[in-house]
């Protein structure tokens, strides 16, 4: 018997689940689905990215939507265009056996009139980024005054990106008696404030520890002089010939500069930051997903919504200003049960930040030394030998 049957899901969802090959619900699904199906309640769920959240709210939502009624019944808000499209695709897969159920993605960087037309045709579920949603409301292109459900996915990320006012304004445009489900990896004050303002007596569920790191990620740091930071990055890349990584920098300028240096030095690298056009961004992400790029150098905001499996390393070329952000960064690796490594390159003056991060992620860092030339040569020779051995 499929474990999902015990959660109370109906036949058409179970068929879709079977097609998708899901066998066992994840912890957040096991905790959230029965609650959301059995009760009409508000919900606050603390769960890291990559824990199967979309299905945790998607399944119950689809089951509660009236597919015969063409009006908009649910709004899902998510921080980035990538995530918005990803959620839309997943909801479409989950609801493929339900006739007449339409889900539309509403996000910036694409034609607003086309999106409005799709909504008008009858979209029971709208998945949107806050900025574009606000725009559609202002232009009278969408009506959410009678929705039954509002879901805030990655709430902390949306607020990090400065969408607080948009979210408050969008929620004020929805009816009071709807259910609000809020999903967030961390619980900063702003998220709690939105919960207080727009939710009544929410059920709370926590998956894993609050803010703690993922068990599949190991953390290491390398102590270097400030001027040797870039050399250290190159050596670490050389010492991991199969590296498939996201390298985090603090600013757009650093991101661009480091990526350019890496490319010049013969590495498969590319930059991802807010100054790229949408087409450039899509191009970079396509190459990264296709593994033509081994090192994606990114800013924190640009890396939101990067959902690529099998990332082997997250490299903190510079530590983030907000220590909490470290958790989001390291969560880009070690997904779906695979192991990953989060590397921090730091200077003496930042050493105390390591213990502060250890307290948050409840895991210890291992201090390592940058490998020298001879060690790297050995690693690369071994790697080459294995590659030759494995060649058909």
Image: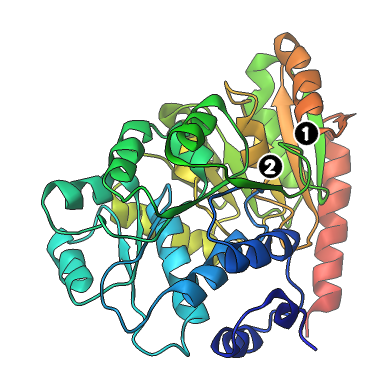
Q: Is residue 292 visible?
A: no
Q: Nearer the viewer, residue 236 or 284?
A: 284
Looking at the picture, does residue 93 appear above or below residue 250?
below
Which residue is denoted by mark 1 in the rendering?
361
Q: Residues within 10 Å of mark 2 (few under 14, many from 20)?
A: many
Q: Report x, y in % for residue 337.
A: 79, 62
The reply to whether the C-beta atoms of the residues labelled 2 and 1 are less than 8 Å apart is: yes
Residue 373 left/right relative to 48:
right
Quadrant of residue 361 in the image?
Answer: top right
Question: Where's the N terminus, which quadrant?
Answer: bottom right
Q: Report x, y in % for residue 179.
A: 46, 54
Which residue in the rendered view is the most extreme toward the top?
349
Callout 2: SS: helix
Residue at 54%, 31% in the rendered image: 192
Q: Is residue 279 visible?
A: yes
Q: Nearer the viewer, residue 314 or 256?
A: 314
Q: Report x, y in % for residue 360.
A: 76, 28
Residue 304 left/right relative to 134:
right
Which residue is denoted by mark 2 in the rendering?
330
Looking at the picture, does residue 258 appear above or below residue 75?
above
Residue at mark 2 to residue at mark 1: CA–CA distance = 10 Å
Query: In this rendering, which labeled residue sits more in front, label 2 or label 1?
Result: 1
Callout 1: SS: helix
Q: Report x, y in % for residue 266.
A: 57, 48
Question: Where's the C terminus, which quadrant?
Answer: bottom right
């Amino acid at each position: 018997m499929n474990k999902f049957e015990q959660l109370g899901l109906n036949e058409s969802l179970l068929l879709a689940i079977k097609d998708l090959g899901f066998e066992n619900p994840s912890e957040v699904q096991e905790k959230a689905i029965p609650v959301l199906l059995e009760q009409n309640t508000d919900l606050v769920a603390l769960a890291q990215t990559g824990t199967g959240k979309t299905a945790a709210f998607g399944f119950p939502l689809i089951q509660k939507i009236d597919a015969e009624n063409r009006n908009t019944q649910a709004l899902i808000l998510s921080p980035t265009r990538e995530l918005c499209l990803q959620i839309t695709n997943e909801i479409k897969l989950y609801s493929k056996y339900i006739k007449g159920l339409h889900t539309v993605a509403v996000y910036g960087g694409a034609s607003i009139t086309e999106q409005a037309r799709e909504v008008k045709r009858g979209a029971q579920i709208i998945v949107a980024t806050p900025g574009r949603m606000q725009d559609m409301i202002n232009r009278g292109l969408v009506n959410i005054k009678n929705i039954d459900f509002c879901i805030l996915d990655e709430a902390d990320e949306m607020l990090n990106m400065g969408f607080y006012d948009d979210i408050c304004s969008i929620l004020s445009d929805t009816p009071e008696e709807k259910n609000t489900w809020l999903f967030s990896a961390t619980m900063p004050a702003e998220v709690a404030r939105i919960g207080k303002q727009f939710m009544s007596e929410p059920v709370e569920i926590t998956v894993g520890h609050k803010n703690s790191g993922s068990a599949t990620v190991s953390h290491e740091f390398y102590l270097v002089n400030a001027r040797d930071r870039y050399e250290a990055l190159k050596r670490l890349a050389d010492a991991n010939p199969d590296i498939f990584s996201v390298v985090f920098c603090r600013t757009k300028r650093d991101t661009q500069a480091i990526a350019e240096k890496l490319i010049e030095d013969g590495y498969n690298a590319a930059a991802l930051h807010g100054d790229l056009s949408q087409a450039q961004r899509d191009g970079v992400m396509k190459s990264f997903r296709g593994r033509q790029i081994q090192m994606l150098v990114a800013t924190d905001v640009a890396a939101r919504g990067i959902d690529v499996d099998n990332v082997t390393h997250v490299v903190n070329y510079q530590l983030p200003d907000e220590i909490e952000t470290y958790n989001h960064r390291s969560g880009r690796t070690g997904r779906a049960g695979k192991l990953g490594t989060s590397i921090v390159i730091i200077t003496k003056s930042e050493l105390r930040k390591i213990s502060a991060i250890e307290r948050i992620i409840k895991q210890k860092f291992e201090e390592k030394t940058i490998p020298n030339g001879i060690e790297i040569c050995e690693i690369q020779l071994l790697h080459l030998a294995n590659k030759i051995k494995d060649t058909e």
